[in-house]
Amino acid sequence: MTVARIKALNIAWWLLPAALALSFSAAVAIGAVYLSPSQLIAAISGQGDGGLAGDIVQVIRLPRALLAAGVGAVLAICGAMLQGLFRNPLADPSLIGVTAGASLGACLAILLGAEVAAAFGSLPVVSIAAFFSGLLAVTLVYKVAKSINGTSVATMLLMGIAVTAFSASLIGLMEYFADNDTLRRMSLWLMGGLDAASYPRAFLVLAVLGVLLASMSRFGTSLNVLLLGESQARHLGIDVERVKTRLIVLVAAGVGTSVAVAGSIAFVGLVVPHIVRLWVGPDHRQLLPLSALAGASLLLVSDTLARTIIAPVEIPVGLITALIGVPFFVSLLRKSRGAI
């Protein structure tokens, strides 16, 4: 490892945790209703009688900030895992069909009028339909790609594209026949949003994030070896099929849960790992946790802006992530053209 790469890693490990702490604090402190520093401290610490400030922080902003951080980290980790598995920096969770499948299930539930019915705790039927339809799509992709010779990454990518195109066609048909109110709800869901945040949703995503974080030490090294090619990885003792299967299951569970609780939020899973890779290098033992920190920070900042730019009206957070990330990504690409 070069001196410059070690220096970049050290800076990243100082800067990204600080960025996460700062963006989380801003997400709790800033909103449509102004709170003085004393009100904010009292609300967070639980001192005093709480009142309106306590309700705003404890009931609205804190669970939303936890959900945004969890979803951003999960999407970024899943994107980094898929890019390592496919050995392609353009890979993202949508390529294996999980996002499209989840969107199809959610739109179908909205069209059937199940958007408010709670079937499992605080999760409405729309979220549950999104989660299981996403898993169903990934299962279909995986079954077709798997043969006695192993799992074909190329077939999996092509099946993911086919499932995405098929799901997009069905969603288009549903939008064509939907009335104006249903069409608006479907469009807002597809653009992603955290307005339905609650503690159960946040803890669900954070639990999935905990599983992903726990798997980093095992799969970080395996993904590094897979960069040499599957044949080389087998010669070096990696059980390639087992690694592929477990990574696909982890990514499907992570992305399916994120889409179920926050809708389809594009860009984070694709570009955040790429930005971090350009910054600190391709070592997945460093790339996975740093991507989680960067993804959480990006979604926290994006959601804070989505809530405050034209408050009290909210902008779908999926639009903000692209508006923030793309200029930064293009700037980083211009500086790192020789390293790609």
Image (cartoon, rainbow, N blue to C red):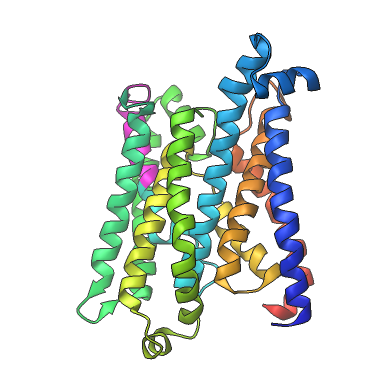
Q: Indicate the position of residue 45 as horizontal and vertical percent values.
A: 66, 23
Name the residue: 50% across, 27% down: 196
Q: Quadrant of residue 122?
A: top left
Q: Quadrant of the N terminus?
A: bottom right
- Of residues 232 and 271, the one nearer the viewer is 232
Q: Indicate the position of residue 73 as horizontal and vertical percent values.
A: 55, 50
Q: Quadrant of residue 239?
A: bottom left
Q: Indicate the position of residue 307 as horizontal and vertical percent values.
A: 67, 29
For this view, does 13 lie left or right of residue 192?
right
Q: Quadrant of the C terminus?
A: bottom right
Please, is residue 204 above or below residue 236 in the view? above
**Is residue 105 a member of the stretch shown in magenta?**
yes
Name the residue: 42% across, 51% down: 254
For this view, does 258 lie left or right of residue 296?
left
Name the residue: 38% across, 89% down: 231
For this view, does 20 lie left or right of residue 11?
left
Name the residue: 61% across, 47% down: 296
Please indicate, yes or no, whether residue 288 appears anywhere in the rendered image: yes
Please, is residue 156 above or below residue 186 in the view? below
Q: Which residues are magenta?
A: 102-117
Please, is residue 200 above or below residue 232 in the view? above
Q: Indicate the position of residue 20 as horizontal and vertical percent values.
A: 68, 46
**Is residue 267 a member of the stretch shown in magenta?**
no
Please, is residue 56 above or below residue 164 in the view? above
